[in-house]
Amino acid sequence: MDPDVLKQAPLFRELDGEAAAALAEAMSTINLRRGAVLFHEGDAGDQLYVVISGKVKLGRSGSGGRENLLAVLGPGQMFGELSVFDPGPRSTTATAVTPVELRCLEHEELAKWLTGRPEVSRALLGQLAERLRRANDVVADLVFSDVPGRVAKALLDLAARFGNPRSEGILVNHDLTQEELAQLVGASRETVNKALADFAARGWIRLEPRSVTLLAVDRIERRAR
């Protein structure tokens, strides 16, 4: 495991080296195969997780059975923090998009760190505030943005976290199926595929299995506004 990955997590950013090492020692390791479910929406649970390698998707199911993909998380990102302050049923289902390694912190262990460690509390509250801002942005996009605009914004978000610069553009290995991309955008697969095909025809992107290369980032940024 790369020790720098844990340092990227909000929980660790404000801790000195000794404290960060002690907190890491208190965490257990979980490995999941692709497609494995860590927990389901409605499950009881109060653990906090940090992604060390791989990708995890967080989704919710609608009344008609359709899944809405809320987030795709990668190394250094954290989830489950809501249960620290509100230990009720899980609000999402967490599923491994790829083989995943996680570090897990139990609620009781975290409570010890919250006592006398205001920097840890600030980090968790900052994470919750960021999630709230993202949720507000998603609602605003659903109301004010068309599907191609939402697709463009999703591609830029994935590129910011999973992109690898190449001479011709940014290669984004998102590891998502077409259906999962549609769930992330909040539209039908057919509509999202039509938007992606249009971007490709314009020369903005090149589509590949479970990945995409952004060839004209400036054009995509303008379309996302």
Image (cartoon, rainbow, N blue to C red):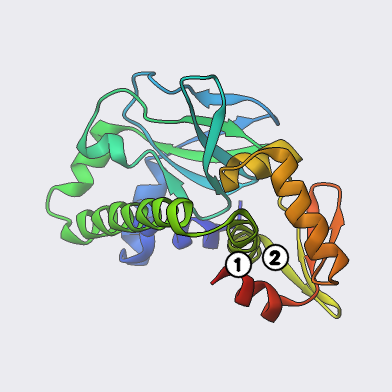
Tell me where residue 113 appears, x and y as whole percent.
22, 47
Q: Residue at x 58, y 31 (%)?
A: 95
Residue 160: which numbered mark, if any? 1
Camera-nearest residue between 107 and 132: 132
Residue 177 appears in the figure: no
Amino acid identity at mark 2: Gly
In the image, taking residue 151 as reference, residue 128 lies left or right, namely left
Q: Residue at x 61, y 77 (%)?
A: 222
Camera-nearest residue between 210 and 84: 210
**Number of numbered discs present?**
2
Sort mark 2 into few (<14), some (14-19) or many (20+) by Cα contacts within 10 Å: many
Camera-nearest residue between 13 and 28: 13
Q: Quadrant of residue 7?
A: bottom left
Sort mark 1 into few (<14), some (14-19) or many (20+) by Cα contacts within 10 Å: few
Residue 69 appears in the figure: yes
Tell me where residue 120 appears, x and y as whole percent.
24, 56
* Element type at mark 2: strand
Image height of 64 relative to 30, above or below: above
Tell me where residue 67 appears, x and y as whole percent.
56, 29
Spatial CA distance of label 1 from label 2 is 6 Å
Which residue in the structure is indicated by mark 2? Answer: 163
Camera-nearest residue between 217 and 114: 217
Q: Residue furthest left?
A: 116
* Element type at mark 1: helix
In the image, taking residue 119 as reference, residue 200 lies left or right, namely right
Amino acid identity at mark 1: Ala
Looking at the image, do the residues carrying marks 1 and 2 touch, with CB atoms under 8 Å apart?
yes
In the image, taking residue 112 as reference, residue 224 lies left or right, namely right
Q: Residue at x 61, y 53 (%)?
A: 147
Tell me where residue 47 appears, x and y as whole percent.
36, 32
Residue 122: which numbered mark, if any? none
Q: Quadrant of residue 150?
A: bottom right
